Image: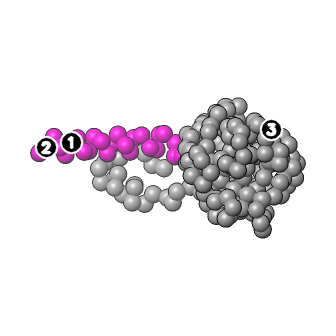
Amino acid sequence: MNTKLITGAGLLLTLGHASPAPATIVTNGSFEEGVVLDGYRTVLAGDAFVRGWEVFGTSIDVLTSPRWTAASGVQSLDLAGTPGVGGVRQWVATEPGSSYLVRFALSRNDEGEGDKTVLFSWGSQTEQLLGGPQGSWSIVERLCVATDPATLISFASPEVGLYGGTLDDVSVTAVPAPASVFPIGIAALAARRRRRGTR
Ligand SMILES: [Ca+2]
């Protein structure tokens, strides 16, 4: 991208011809591939049923509507399988130093008691999260920086019970480099101030 000089007019031109939003680099982020016809399907660690994702721990469950409402499509995951502990993980191709927006929907399976903690990991960084009540999805967004050419993203339920946090609609999209973002924002702010100052 040419970032030599950005004027007010140049700013409008740049934004007007912006590229479409980058596509997600996650495979099967909505868990719709591998169709479950009724209720749920338990997927054991190592089973490749959930395309693009490695199931680890003991097992996870693929849940389907209408018994469990998905955040996107008709299927979602209960990260505590039958039984937990369980989780899914996937390697995504990343560029060291680049930023990525990781977005996903969290809820929980309220058909049983138990902890509904979800551990979200980006590479070596892990965050403990709690989803909302069943059917009420919370959207989580995290800006993550890659340090390697491939990054492992992981979602896990640490509990041994049958009912855990539920997950759907995972996406990872590249965020434009700061060098091409901040000058535009600063130029826009400066232009706005100049306009205000002349009135
Ligand atoms: Ca889905």
Q: Nearer the viewer, mark 2 or mark 3?
A: 3
Q: Is mark 2 within 8 Å of ligand 1?
A: no
Amino acid bearing label 3:
Val
Q: How far apart are labels 2 and 3 at the CA level?
A: 66 Å
Q: Which residue is mark 1?
A: 194
Q: How far apart are labels 1 and 2 at the CA level?
A: 6 Å
Tag 3 or tag 1, which sits nearer the N-term?
3
Q: Which residue is mark 3?
A: 160
Q: Nearer the viewer, mark 1 or mark 3?
A: 3
Amino acid bearing label 1:
Arg
Crowd rating for badge 2 (residues with CA inside 10 Å; few <14, some 14–19, many 20+): few
Q: Position of residue 132 (x, y in %)?
A: 58, 45
Classify mark 1: helix, strand or loop: helix
Crowd rating for badge 1 (residues with CA inside 10 Å; few <14, some 14–19, many 20+): few
Name, please, the residue furthest toward the left: 199
Q: Is mark 3 within 8 Å of ligand 1?
A: no
Classify mark 2: helix, strand or loop: helix
